[in-house]
Amino acid sequence: MSATPHTLYTLLEGLEGDGLLPAGDAARLAALPVSEEVRDPWYVVLLVGAGAWLAGILFLVFIAGTKLVDTSFKVMIAGAVLMPVALVLRWKTKHLFNHQLAFAAGIAGQLGFVLGLGAELDFTAETWAAAFAVEVLLVWLYPDFAHRLLSTLLAVAAAAGFVYRLEWFSLIHGLVLVLAVATGLWLYEAKGAAGRLRRHYRPVGYGLAAGLLGVLILSLSREMIDVGDWWKSSIVVGGALVVLVYQVLDGQAVRGVVRWGMVVAALAVAAVAWETPGISAALFVLVLGFSRGNRLLTGAALVFLALFVGFFYYNLQLTLLVKSGVLAGSGLLFLGLRQVFLTMTRREADDG
Amino acid sequence: MSQPPSRKRLFELAEAGRLSAAALEQALVRAGHLPDRAAWRVFMDRMLLALGAVLLLAGIVFFFAYNWYDLPRLGKLGLVEALLVGAIAGAWYRGLNDLVGRVLLLAAAVLVGVFLAVFGQVYQTGADAYELFLPWALFILPWVVLGRFIPLWLFGLALVDVTVSLYWEQVVAPEMRERAAMFLVLFVFNAGAHVAWAAGMAKGVGWLKGKWGLYLIVILTLYLLVVPTFILIFDGVSRAAGDPLLYAVPVVFAGYLAVCLWYYLRRVRDLFVVAACLFSIIIVDTAFLVKVADVEFWGFLGIGLLVVAQSAGAARWLRKLGGEGTA
């Protein structure tokens, strides 16, 4: 990413010249005051979300402690009442304290509703289906970045809970496929920003990416859910990675050795990380983040990549000696690929 | 008119309906916010190097972790020595200005530990685990200093932390009753690393520009103070009677917070560190209130409202300080 020589005005002027902006808009847009709408840095979003979560749990303890709410059914009803109250408070007020209070009350409501319903229904698949529906509704209705991100994550968790309670574990690969495709929509970020869903696409996009990586954490422990055939998810995310790499580089007119080198590397990763689909998934999000110049997505993907690579060893169903051979062999494969890639790009540059 | 075409500003215009999707995409390309061919080439080069190096090293470590009786003693030691010498020679040949050279130096630092472990395995030294980590940390110290490589630096710090923790567990307090001193010693090392990093950044040391390593150290240092503060809060006076240094932890915690907030507000504006400090304050005072107030259920409502007020206040303050965000 080279440094830009432009000012905003010269950039917009160029767009105007190419017919991408109506005549006269460049000067007008460049002179517009900076929006007063706050776009928080990620750590402020995290602080707000974590604070609301903590307060929400304390509110729930308070509700459970009152004599008025003494059965799981009543906890569910209290939760169901709190959610619309939180929504109205968020819609109707502008003060940050009220927004945070609404967020915390909403969290308490969601937890109360799901826990109460779960206690009533013994946490059957229906509980998780209801939780999923509630979270999707809140993503749509609740006008807050951190809340939408959290609701997206909770919706993914509810979907995983649904699959778990159905005991049809192979469905998890279908969920991984849906999440990978949905996360891939980051490629159409510009359409999201300029479209009707401009308030939703970023928090939902981050939530989906985190949800994809979060679901694949299940593959790290066979004690949690014994899906047994994680290689199916590896095919899903490995395929998604290869398609993504090809499409992104094609779209950005990066062809020749760089493109094919990256496609081969993606295939190699998918093949090596057969039992650990999280590695391909983290690389999928990493490539996506890098292609969009999105540092937050890239950074999050790197953290998960380190986690999945760290656990790669444990997932290999082999003896210690063979495991070490697979690890070292994989390392040599990637270093060899790098050497081939460097040689070919150098040759390509020499050929002009 | 002279404002830069920042990514945030371009998205703001699009989200306000002033730029079409096609115009936004073109603007991002022309402003250099999307990677070009050269950037992709560097990305791929680094990814393959990092993945390859990590997996190869892991393979070597596990090869020697395998209790391989068939290989003669000297064969094992010779093999690991050959790898170590090869990594050092490679680093020397490539030089420390080259990324591959620095990765080879990091590999050599890891292999020193493998050598010490194999040595202990071959000669059955019966040493405690900290006796492996201590010389390991000491031997690689010059490379950490000379390497000018953030992963190597963090690896060195991690070794020091593991050494201190194991020393405490195995020698000083095997029953882990007197843990405050361990946390304080760990704090001294990590806060020292923090100060060194901050000083390097202030002097414009090029390789310390990336902030992710600094943030890791700040989070770890805060963690090292929050955990013993929690122990003091929840285990209380009875615990502190056998571990009086626990009383010093809140003082050190307050001091570290004060210095961080002063430095990152007044000297170098870094709101991530400020946010981390504020969050640690919120969780510690919430724990304190829950424990000390010995609350009935009404109290939980009050403390919940206090958490709401604190997090809203912190967010408002950070927004005011930040002016414009980056998410």
Image: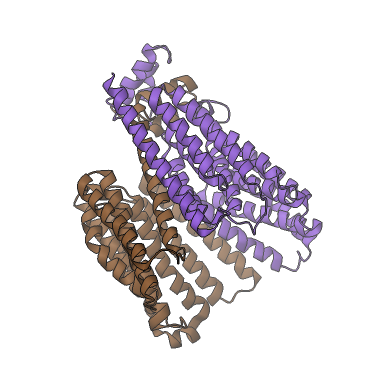
Q: Is residue A293 above or below residue A305?
A: above
Task: Identify which residue, B305 or B170, lies in the foreground.
Answer: B170
Task: Identify which residue, B294 or B226, lies in the foreground.
Answer: B226
Q: What residue is rendered at 48% in x and 76% in y?
A: B231
- Left or right: A311 with respect to A123? left
Figure colour of chain B: brown
- Which percent across, then down, holds residue A185? 55, 31
Q: What residue is rendered at 26% in x and 56% in y?
A: B85
Quadrant housing residue A265? top left
- Left or right: B4 with respect to A247? left
Task: Identify which residue, A183 or A119, lies in the foreground.
Answer: A183
- Which percent across, then down, holds residue B261? 33, 60
- Left or right: B106 with respect to A100? left
Q: Is residue A84 above or below residue A72?
A: above
Q: What residue is rendered at 27% in x and 25% in y?
A: A5
- Left or right: B247 with respect to A178? left
Q: What residue is rendered at 60% in x and 46% in y?
A: A153
- Which percent across, then down, holds residue A17? 36, 12
Colour-to-chain, purple = A
Q: Is residue B190 above or below residue A346?
A: below
